[in-house]
Image: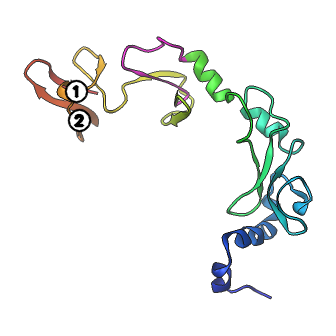
């Protein structure tokens, strides 16, 4: 029997996820054996997340510098189907390790941010933008702008930069002692 749209929308999120997991079984990247694998779920109906050292070891180990075998999980996606979940793996990612190699302290001029393959890491967060195959690139990130000499610095007097649509660049208002800054 077909389920009407109103009936589907009235189901709880968990029930919708479980229903979608049966419909999109072919999209599964891994399996929780219908809830009979160690994890969180309902035996016989399905798992929300389970331990998957065999089926997700290869994918997670390809992402992290250190092998991720016993911490790999298989998790139910909101859109349906199970996917490998590497969030419990420890250590740096291979992407971060490469960034560290090419963007060591002093790799860029004072005030600039180092990007490797379009990604910049700072603390526990990262930003990826632009060309992902660009290698190392030193950028002057907002709210800093480049002055006449090419130095990346904040606007004088802690003023916020403005954006010039014509030149597609950030700039600082003219000030008596520093002139105009452009990115």
Mark earlier in primary sequence (2, 1) = 1
Q: Quadrant of residue 2?
A: bottom right
Query: Where does label 1 land, which residue?
Result: 155
Q: Does residue 81 sit above or below 180 in this rendering?
A: below
Pointers 2 and 1 in contact (C-beta within 8 Å)? yes
Between 35 and 160, the residue placed more toward the observer is: 35
Residue at image location 70% in from the left, 42% down from the top? 87
The 10 Å Cα crowd at callout 1, few under 14, some 14 to 19, many 20 or more, is many
- Say the numbered circle drawn on residue 141: none
Residue segment shown in magenta? 103-119
**Was residue 129 drawn as part of the magenta stretch in this picture?**
no
Q: Is residue 58 left or right of residue 115?
A: right
Q: Is residue 109 left or right of residue 75?
A: left
Q: SS at mark 2?
A: loop
In this view, which residue lies farthest toward the top?
A: 106
Query: Where does label 2 land, which residue?
Result: 160
């Amino acid at each position: 029997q077909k389920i009407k749209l109103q009936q589907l929308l009235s189901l709880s999120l968990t029930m919708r996820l479980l229903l979608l997991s049966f419909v999109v079984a072919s999209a599964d990247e891994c399996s929780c054996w219908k809830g009979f694998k160690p994890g969180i779920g309902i035996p016989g109906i399905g798992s929300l997340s389970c331990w998957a050292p065999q089926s997700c070891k290869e994918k997670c180990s390809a992402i992290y510098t250190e092998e991720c075998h016993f911490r790999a999980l298989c998790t139910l996606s909101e859109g349906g189907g199970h996917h490998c979940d590497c969030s419990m793996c420890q250590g740096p990612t291979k992407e971060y390790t490469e960034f560290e190699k090419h963007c060591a302290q002093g790799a860029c001029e004072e005030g600039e941010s180092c990007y490797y393959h379009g990604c910049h890491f700072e603390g526990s967060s990262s930003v990826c933008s632009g060309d992902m195959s660009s290698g190392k690139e030193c950028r002057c990130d907002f709210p800093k702008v480049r002055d006449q000499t090419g130095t990346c610095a904040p606007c004088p007097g802690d003023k916020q930069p403005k954006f010039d649509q014509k030149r597609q660049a950030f700039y600082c208002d003219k000030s008596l002692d520093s002139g105009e800054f452009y990115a």
